[in-house]
């Protein structure tokens, strides 16, 4: 019954390594999001996408990039990982953002906990 | 700026009632969400309010006052499994979610 799947639950990387976090959803949702979650802070939006090959910067895009080549898949890339990117990364999806309340409900993946040494 | 405030932590007793408050300031407003997040798990949707008033869903209810920029989540007949973080999020005029830091709810027997 898993609807948003993140490829890795736990990763440990070295400073300077390139990191790929994969996310796949099977609900045919238009919107996909990448957040990071740190203790004491709310969810912070890194990037989001409203359509294939389309991306928009969120609140904290620096040090990250994304790719959406297929509707169901949204990848987060850390070109050169740094220790301050140690965090929990959450992928989410939703229907198109409109006035319809149901369209804006997010379905989250289980999260990817990244540690950068 | 945009801001969501909610208490960091609350403690309640099994079988009791608890109210988790959330105040928000956003550029425009298109609704208020509550999510539940158990430790180490993904957030899951609990409720959505866009009109003033109380929405009830079983043991959980959510209230909204748009004029006061205020919402609360009410949990009745608390169970141990309700121990979790509760996240408040407001949808702004651009349909972007503004998140609170979450309220950790501890249930004691």
Image (cartoon, coloured by chain):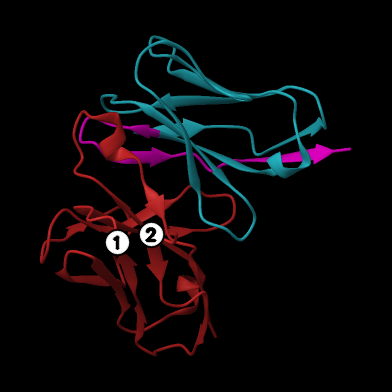
Whether B20 is drawn above or below A103: the answer is above
- Same subunit, tags 1 and 2: yes
SS category of the residue bearing label 1:
loop
- Cβ atoms at labels 1 and 2 below 8 Å apart: yes
Span highlighted in magenta in the image: B90-109
Please report the residue visible at 62 percent of the width from the left and 51 percent of the height from the top.
Answer: B38
Chain A, colour shown = red
Give the residue at mark 1.
Answer: A26
User: Residue at point 22% right, 56% down?
Assistant: A28
**Quadrant, the N terminus of chain B:** top left
Q: Please, which chain is the residue tagged with disc 2 on?
A: A
Report the side of B24 relative to B21 (left or right). left
Neighbourhood count class around disc 2 (C-alpha, 10 Å): few under 14, some 14–19, many 20 upward = some
Q: What is the drawing colour of chain B?
A: cyan
- Location of mark 2 (residue): A3
B49 is higher (above) or lower (below) than A112:
above
């Amino acid at each position: 019954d898993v609807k948003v799947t993140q490829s890795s639950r736990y990763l440990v990387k070295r400073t300077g390594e390139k990191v790929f976090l994969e996310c796949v959803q099977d609900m045919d949702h238009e919107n996909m999001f990448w957040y990071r979650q740190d203790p004491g802070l709310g969810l912070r939006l890194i990037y989001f996408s409203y359509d294939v090959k389309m991306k928009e910067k969120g609140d904290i895009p620096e040090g990250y990039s994304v790719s959406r080549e297929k509707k169901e898949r949204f990848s987060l890339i850390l070109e050169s990982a740094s220790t301050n990117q140690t965090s929990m990364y959450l992928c989410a999806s939703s229907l198109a953002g409109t006035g319809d309340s149901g369209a804006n409900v997010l379905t989250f993946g289980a999260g990817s906990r990244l540690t950068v040494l | 700026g945009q801001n969501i405030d909610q208490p960091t932590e609350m403690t309640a007793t099994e079988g009791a009632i608890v109210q988790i408050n959330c105040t928000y300031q956003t550029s425009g407003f298109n609704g208020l969400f509550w999510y539940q997040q158990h430790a180490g798990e993904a957030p899951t949707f609990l409720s959505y309010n866009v009109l003033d008033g109380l929405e009830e869903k079983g043991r959980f209810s959510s209230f909204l006052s748009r004029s006061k920029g205020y919402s609360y989540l009410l949990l009745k007949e608390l169970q141990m499994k309700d121990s979790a973080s509760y996240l408040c999020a407001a949808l702004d005029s651009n349909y972007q979610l503004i998140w609170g830091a979450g309220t950790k709810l501890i249930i004691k027997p």
